[in-house]
Image (cartoon, grey):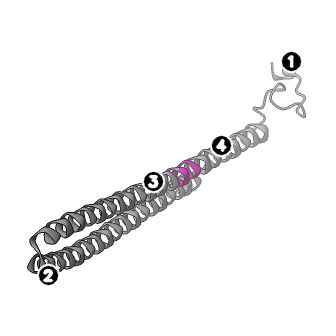
Amino acid sequence: MSHEQSYRAGETKGQTQAKVGQTLESMKDKAQAAKDKTSETAHDKTSGAAQATHDKTSGAAQATKDKAAGAAQATKDKTSGTAQATKEKASGAAQATKEKASEMMESAKETAQAGEEKAGGILQQTGQQVKSMAQGAADAVKHTFGMADTDEDPDVTKDKTLNH
């Protein structure tokens, strides 16, 4: 294998590794951005819903309290239960969103690993091809200079006694 071929093989390997690295980094960035966006959206919706529920509950409880002390206590208990249920639902939604973002991140990681493994296979195959070409070139040089053994090259028939 010539110096130029070796250089090109190394250059190709380096370029492939750089591309895999860039792709992996890009996928990580996109997954993190998606996770951040999902978390932010879930937080905004949860906060707004909790505030609206709180505002409604406070207003209803105050009006009921003004009408009758007994009825106010019952309404307050009922709305407190509704607020708790809403809070639990919002918490569940936020958890589901976090889990989905985590799954997306894991999927992106697996995809990047598969791409990296594929690139490694291509590099190994290229290395085998380069090795095979180098062996072919070495055999051709031996044959040209009459250095090939008959075991290596069945087309060459030499009478070794003539060399003495």
Q: Which residues make up the magenta segment?
A: 114-119
Classify mark 3: helix, strand or loop: helix
Residue nearest the observer in this picture, 21 or 154: 21
Q: Main secondary structure of the magenta part?
A: helix
Q: Which residue is mark 3?
A: 109
Measured along the vertical axis of the image, is residue 50 above or below residue 20? below
Classify mark 2: helix, strand or loop: helix
Instruction: State which quarter of the image contains the C terminus.
Output: top right
Q: Which is more N-terminal, label 2 or label 4?
A: 2
Q: Which residue is mark 4?
A: 128
Q: Which residue is mark 1?
A: 161
* Residue at figure coordinates x 40%, y 67% from the top left: 30
Q: Which is more N-terminal, label 3 or label 1?
A: 3
Classify mark 1: helix, strand or loop: helix
* Residue at figure coordinates x 34%, y 58% from the top left: 92
Disc 4 residue type?
Answer: Gln
Mark 4–mark 2 Cα distance, whole angstroms, equals 84 Å
How many marks the image carries: the answer is: 4
Q: Which residue is mark 2?
A: 63
| 131 on left or right of 3 | right
Disc 1 residue type?
Answer: Thr
Q: Which mark is residue 84?
A: none
Which callout, 4 or 2, points to the residue nearer the camera? 2
Q: Which is more N-terminal, label 4 or label 3?
A: 3
Circle 2 packing at 10 Å, graded few (<14), some (14-19), many (20+), is: few
